[in-house]
Image: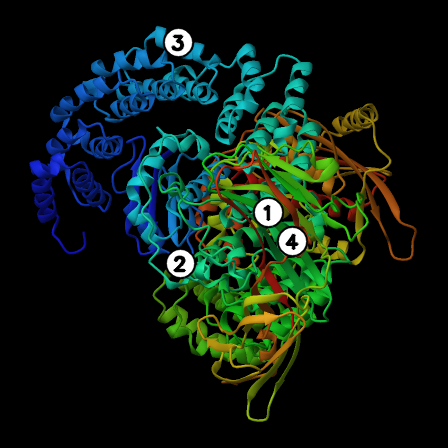
């Protein structure tokens, strides 16, 4: 049972506050924020307790989403609810930020009113909610010239038309109805990989977690069929098709997905409701179908002047057509590090010594497959001793691989039936994130 | 409203609301009301606008209506009289043809929380229960619960309760679940909604219609149901099987909770259910939401208490989970928060997994992984990793010591401190590591700054001072700085260490001991330190032999090693807290760095009982030994026993098994001959021995038979029969076979049968005495002292009488057995404190 829900900005501004049961005192928000600020280093635990108040919070979009619950309530339920609620807010407001919450507070109150009554969760299905929500979202996105870049010159079909603008999926679901906005559907295949590569280059751990998300902007869509690779197989024993198998270990589906054609043709059938939903989740553990995307070849030594020299070669083993973007390597450095001088192999890279985190951040905006980059870092360390080398490493990599799935999962086709009246657009997007990519030195 | 004062804001808003031009323009009116709500949610007191807002309520614009209701519900309790005006509008809305308007009006009518309005609300609520639209019924059902809580003392209308029970058959699943919730609140005093067989089966059959939230609610309420037959139970279980592996963590957790509740009498089924949820739980551990991951981790930790091997094959899932370095830029703030939350859960889980999991194949990998965290920027993470390495060190000491020694080279405060503390704990359990540790200790005093680290170093110097060549110099530095020393614990430890070192290296230490004692007696203001110093001073007057006797305590407790593998707990010990906030809160307690003293001094540990060696109360054991020793007449036997058992290991075994009948025959036969002699002292015959011993352990008679049995089995003692806990006299019968290898001879095998007896004629004084010595930094010698005080009150102590019979006779084996038994009993005692 949830007695209060509130949203706080990271500075402690009250954005939304709703008391469902009128049992707790008024200054619950203040109590919570005091507890958060009393902790050093911005690390509030998920559950905090003061007398009989139990605060459970999640952080989404840089905001605290807090529920006050009784001690016997299920943490899974409350956390799942807060996540679901923030997802709903994101669906309805377009994006999740302090500003969008502030601008749409009336909408969020309306939403909360329908979602929870007297502390009991009523429904969070966007199909049901869309009948009850009347307030229109206020979009906070400023006018941008980039939006115009999608307009074909003199109406010509350009290549750009086939790529959805990056902001396309961050708009409120409701506008489509009133403004006759485009009826679009997005199917995203998102994978997160966590990899550990040992100092000898051996792959020590490789897990992939993936999901297929559908974001639907169509007011009415009766049925959608998503076709996966024919070779898609679940578990170790089962192998299908003649090509290279696309294998996952475990796989689970959204309740609404009908699987009658899944076994024979790998087709998922569902009636998507408005907004975002996760249709399928899958995991692959201890195995990667292809080589890990990055390899590091480090040379680390002390020079005569008491400096630490690090020569790092980073190789990207993706297929030549793909590229990794927003790559950032974090290299922990010894405690007494004072300053850094660097030689990077191309001008678009940059690096910075973060003294607070005791690490060098090496950023590479774009890293094409099959290429190799190198960097030479000279580090001034006060009191450098042989054992300082222990503090160097392991290197963590953060990156994004657009239009690529590590498991090889592809969407063969996406069909809507009955065929939508008027123009409708279907987008399929693939992306792989690094959940945790560690290379030991 | 950052810049305007709140009064100006309210005045401004009032003027706008009253302006007829605004009122006639729908959009302007709405946006003014929006401004009011915005001010309200920012914390401005806008209650003064109540009457204007009441007027704004009468409108056809549904958005405006909703906004006004938000306002009214927040401020109604402040303006009960004006709220009466709203009721009319609301009641009119309840007749509206649009179901949405009806439900809105009904909900807000009940949300006003004004007892004075109840009479006006009842009629529309009754009508609402029979409304055509499901959304109105949902609101009406919960409305009754709200109404009841407004006037908790009023008589509840039986007709309403009946109607609510009837609505359990409502076609709309949300109405059904809301009925459960409402009845649960209304009938709280009668123990909630009645869960009988027809209702249970009805709910179970309709479970699939509800969404995730409804399912969780139903599953939770069904925990009260007790199936009438085994067949029914298994029908229910098989019906729920699909929910157990649900991809939604809330449903999975609620189902498991129900499973454990239903199967409390069927441990095998419960264990199978735990196995079954492994997949979904692991999936939750890899969820996108960090908070869900944390929750899943905390619950896995619970599961591991009963099924330590559950995650065996998946250890990799745990050890890399939190190492995500930096995140994408916008998420950095978020990430910082999580990094704090995860390692605590993580390290605890890993510690437990490790205990079960470390084997020759993966130890290198695990250590490699942990090594990476030792230099983490976050000091808590680093220290957790170092102490985890120490735990592995109990089985793989060489590799771990190598890592730990390497870390000392970093010369960083928090790392050195953690390493020294870890080494101290390790040496206490594995004395064979002491050589390496002694070598490593040289020179690390310079980097040690914090209290715990220095205390640990001093303890190590006290125990292994003769082997650390620089020990006197290190001590000298400490003694020179004693004036500026702030910590009481360090001072006490320093006194003891200097005394002990004086015993083994008198020439180098005499001078500084003199200086230290002089300072502590003459200048020290703290009573504890002064008393301690005075005590040592007088002790020295009695001669070195006497001093040695008092001071030379035990250096290690290898018997702890036996107990490291925790016995699997019963599911019932944690099942009640599964799927509540409790496991998550334990995680937070764990973040506070537990202040630990030296292993000998640890008295009651405030930490939850996650880790046996920490809670094993060694100082208590020492007291006990000195107590029982002088009572039964042999001096310092415990050390001897341990020493001898070290030299020639004693092993216990359960085979050949003894049947209860056989046991009874043996016991009675000996009993008879024992009674003939009628003596309580050690009695000897040619082939067998019978002796009685007193062991102090206050909590033993209250501990559950299962945990006692599990603990005994771990050291290969079989328990045969129990009386239930909390009965007097309380008895346990047990047996074991000892195998004592004499050098050069064939091993001798003896059979021991025994009885633990607790008569319950004990006073509470012992407990009080112990409290006196609990206050943290009390040095061991003081514990020794109170031990002596205890001896004088021997007759009043709470103790368990052990009667043991051995055949054939072997004194050494018998003593070894007794010391193992004592250790087991004491390990169990703190669990119930």
- B601 over B267 or under it: above or below: below
Q: Position of residue B583 (x, y in %)?
A: 51, 41
Cα separation, mark 2 vs mark 4, equals: 29 Å
Cα separation, mark 1 vs mark 2, equals: 30 Å
For residue A42, which numbered disc appears in the image?
2
Cα separation, mark 1 vs mark 4, equals: 10 Å
Q: State the quadrant of the C terminus of chain A.
A: bottom right
Quadrant location of residue B723? top right
Q: Considering the numbered disc 4 on the image, is that residue within a helix, a strand or a loop?
A: strand
At 56% from the left edge and 43% from the top edge, which residue is drawn? B296
For residue B163, which numbered disc appears in the image?
3
Marks 1 and 2, the one that precedes in the sequence: 2
Cα separation, mark 3 vs mark 4, equals: 52 Å
Residue found at the far bottom of this picture: A304
Residue annotated with mark 4: A208
Chain containing the residue with disc 3: B
Cα separation, mark 3 vs mark 1, equals: 45 Å
Q: Are marks 1 and 2 in contact (CB under 8 Å)?
A: no
Q: Nearer the viewer, residue B472 or B792?
A: B472
Q: Is residue A118 left or right of residue A185?
A: left
Quadrant location of residue B798? top right
In this rendering, which labeled residue sits more in front, label 3 or label 1? 1
Q: Is residue A240 left or right of residue B771?
A: right
Same-subunit check for callouts 2 and 4: yes
Chain containing the residue with disc 4: A
10 Å crowding of disc 4: few (<14), some (14-19), many (20+): many
- B75 over B556 or under it: above or below: above
Residue annotated with mark 1: A211
Q: Nearer the viewer, residue A63 or A381?
A: A63
């Amino acid at each position: 049972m949830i007695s209060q829900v509130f949203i706080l900005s990271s500075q402690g501004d009250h954005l939304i506050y709703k008391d469902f049961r009128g049992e707790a005192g008024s200054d619950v928000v203040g109590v919570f924020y005091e507890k958060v600020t009393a902790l050093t280093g911005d690390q509030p635990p998920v559950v905090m307790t003061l007398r009989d108040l139990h605060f459970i919070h999640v952080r989404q979009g840089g905001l605290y989403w807090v529920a006050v619950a009784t001690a016997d309530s299920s943490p899974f339920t409350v956390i799942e609810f807060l996540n679901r609620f923030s997802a709903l807010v994101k669906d309805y407001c377009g994006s999740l930020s302090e500003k969008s919450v502030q601008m749409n507070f009336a909408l969020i109150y309306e939403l909360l009113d329908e979602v929870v009554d007297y502390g009991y969760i009523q429904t969070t299905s966007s199909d049901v909610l869309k009948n009850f929500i009347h307030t229109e979202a206020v979009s906070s996105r400023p006018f941008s010239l980039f939006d115009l870049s999608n307009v074909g010159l003199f109406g010509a079909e350009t290549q750009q038309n086939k790529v959805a603008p990056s902001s396309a999926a961050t708009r409120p679901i409701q506008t489509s109805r009133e403004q006759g906005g485009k009826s679009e559907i997005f199917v995203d295949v998102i994978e997160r990989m966590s990899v550990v590569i040992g100092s000898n280059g051996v792959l020590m751990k490789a897990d992939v977690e993936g999901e297929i998300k559908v974001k639907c902007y169509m007011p009415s869509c009766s049925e959608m069929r998503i076709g996966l690779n024919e070779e898609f197989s679940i578990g170790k024993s089962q192998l299908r098709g003649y090509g290279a198998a696309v294998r996952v270990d475990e796989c689970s589906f959204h309740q609404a997905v009908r699987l009658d054609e899944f076994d024979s043709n790998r087709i998922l059938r569902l009636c998507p409701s408005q907004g975002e939903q996760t249709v399928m989740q899958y995991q692959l553990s201890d195995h990667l179908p292809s080589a890990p995307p990055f390899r590091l070849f480090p040379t680390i030594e002390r020079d005569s002047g008491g400096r630490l020299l690090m020569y790092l070669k980073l190789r990207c083993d993706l297929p030549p057509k793909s590229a990794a973007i927003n790559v950032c390597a974090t290299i922990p450095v010894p405690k007494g590090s004072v300053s850094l001088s660097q030689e990077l192999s191309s001008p678009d890279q940059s690096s910075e010594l973060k003294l607070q985190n005791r690490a060098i951040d090496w950023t590479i905006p774009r890293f094409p497959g099959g290429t190799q980059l190198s960097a030479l870092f000279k580090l001034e360390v006060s009191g450098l001793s042989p054992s300082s080398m222990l503090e160097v490493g392991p290197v963590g990599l953060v990156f994004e691989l657009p239009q690529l799935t590590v498991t090889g999962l592809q969407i063969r086709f996406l069909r809507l039936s009955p065929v939508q009246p008027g123009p409708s657009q279907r987008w399929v997007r693939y992306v792989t994130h690094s959940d945790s990519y560690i290379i030991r030195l | 409203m950052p810049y305007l004062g709140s009064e100006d804001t309210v005045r401004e808003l009032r003027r706008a609301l009253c302006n007829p031009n605004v009122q006639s323009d729908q959009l302007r009116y709405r946006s003014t009301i929006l401004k009011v709500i915005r001010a309200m949610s920012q914390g401005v007191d806008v209650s003064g606008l109540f009457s204007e807002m009441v007027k704004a309520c009468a409108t056809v614009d549904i958005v405006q209506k909703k906004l006004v209701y938000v306002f009214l519900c927040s401020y109604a309790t402040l303006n009960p009289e004006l709220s009466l005006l709203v009721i009319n509008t609301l009641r009119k809305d309840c007749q509206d043809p649009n179901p949405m308007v009806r439900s809105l009006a009904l909900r807000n009518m009940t949300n006003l929380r004004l007892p004075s309005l109840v009479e006006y609300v009842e009629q529309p609520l009754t009508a609402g229960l029979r409304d055509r639209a499901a959304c109105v019924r949902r609101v009406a059902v919960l409305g009754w619960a709200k109404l009841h809580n407004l006037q908790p003392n009023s008589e509840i209308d039986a007709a309403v309760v009946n109607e609510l029970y009837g609505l359990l058959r409502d076609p709309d699943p949300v109405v059904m679940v809301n009925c459960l919730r409402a009845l649960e609140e209304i009938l709280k005093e009668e123990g909630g909604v009645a869960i009988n067989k027809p209702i249970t089966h009805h709910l179970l059959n309709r479970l699939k219609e509800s969404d995730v939230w409804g399912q969780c609610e139903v599953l939770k309420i069904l925990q009260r149901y007790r199936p009438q037959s085994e067949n029914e139970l298994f029908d229910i279980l098989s019906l729920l099987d699909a929910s157990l592996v649900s991809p939604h963590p809330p449903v999975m957790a609620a189902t498991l909770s129900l499973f454990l509740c239903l199967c409390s009498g069927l441990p095998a089924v419960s264990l199978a259910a735990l196995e079954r949820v492994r997949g979904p739980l692991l999936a939750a551990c890899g969820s996108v939401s960090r908070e869900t991951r944390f929750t899943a981790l905390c619950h896995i930790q619970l599961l591991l208490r009963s099924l330590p091997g559950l995650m065996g094959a998946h250890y990799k899932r745990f050890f890399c989970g939190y190492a995500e370095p930096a995140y994408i830029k916008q998420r950095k703030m978020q990430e910082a928060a999580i990094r704090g939350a995860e390692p605590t859960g993580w390290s605890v889980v890993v510690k437990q997994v490790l205990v079960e999991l470390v084997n020759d194949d993966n130890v290198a990998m695990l250590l490699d992984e942990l090594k990476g965290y030792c230099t983490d920027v976050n000091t808590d993470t680093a220290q957790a990793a170092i102490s985890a390495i120490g735990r592995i060190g109990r089985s793989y000491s060489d590799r771990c010591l190598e890592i730990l020694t390497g870390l000392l080279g970093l010369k960083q405060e928090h790392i050195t401190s953690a390493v020294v503390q870890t080494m101290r704990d390790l040496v206490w359990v594995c004395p064979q590591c002491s050589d390496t540790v002694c070598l490593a200790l040289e020179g690390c005093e310079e980097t040690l700054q914090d209290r715990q680290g220095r205390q640990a170093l001093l303890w190590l110097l006290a125990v292994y001072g003769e082997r650390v060549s620089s020990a006197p110099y290190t001590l000298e530095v400490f003694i020179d700085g004693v004036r500026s020393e702030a910590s009481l614990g360090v001072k006490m430890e320093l006194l003891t260490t200097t005394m002990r070192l004086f015993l083994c290296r008198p020439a180098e230490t005499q001078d500084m001991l003199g200086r230290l004692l002089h300072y502590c007696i003459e200048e020290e203001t703290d009573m504890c330190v002064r008393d301690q110093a005075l005590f040592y001073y007088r002790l020295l007057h009695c001669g070195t032999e006497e001093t040695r006797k008092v001071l030379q305590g035990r250096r290690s407790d290898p018997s702890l090693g036996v107990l490291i593998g925790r016995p699997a707990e019963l599911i019932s010990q944690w099942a009640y807290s599964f799927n509540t906030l409790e496991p998550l809160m334990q995680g937070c307690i764990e973040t506070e760095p537990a202040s630990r003293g030296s292993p000998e001094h640890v008295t009651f540990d405030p930490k939850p009982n996650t880790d046996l060696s920490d809670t094993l109360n060694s100082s208590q054991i020492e007291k006990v030994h000195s107590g029982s020793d002088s009572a039964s007449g042999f001096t310092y036997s415990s050390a001897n026993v341990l020493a001898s058992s070290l030299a020639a290991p004693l092993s216990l075994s359960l085979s050949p098994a003894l049947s209860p009948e056989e046991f009874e025959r043996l016991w009675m036969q000996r009993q008879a001959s024992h009674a003939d002699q009628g003596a309580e002292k050690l009695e000897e015959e040619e082939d067998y021995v019978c002796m009685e011993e007193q062991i102090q352990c206050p909590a033993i008679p209250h501990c559950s038979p299962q945990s006692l049995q599990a603990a005994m089995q771990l050291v290969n003692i079989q328990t045969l029969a129990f009386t239930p806990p909390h009965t007097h006299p309380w008895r346990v019968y047990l047996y074991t076979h000892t195998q004592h290898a004499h050098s050069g001879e064939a091993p001798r095998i003896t059979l021991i049968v025994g009885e633990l007896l607790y008569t319950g004629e004990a006073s509470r004084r012992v407990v009080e005495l112990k409290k006196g010595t609990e206050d943290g930094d009390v040095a061991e010698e003081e514990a020794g002292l109170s031990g002596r005080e205890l001896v004088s009150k021997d007759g009043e102590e709470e103790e368990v009488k052990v009667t043991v019979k051995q055949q054939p006779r072997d004194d050494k084996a018998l003593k070894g057995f007794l010391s193992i038994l004592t250790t087991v009993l004491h390990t169990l005692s703190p669990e119930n404190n």
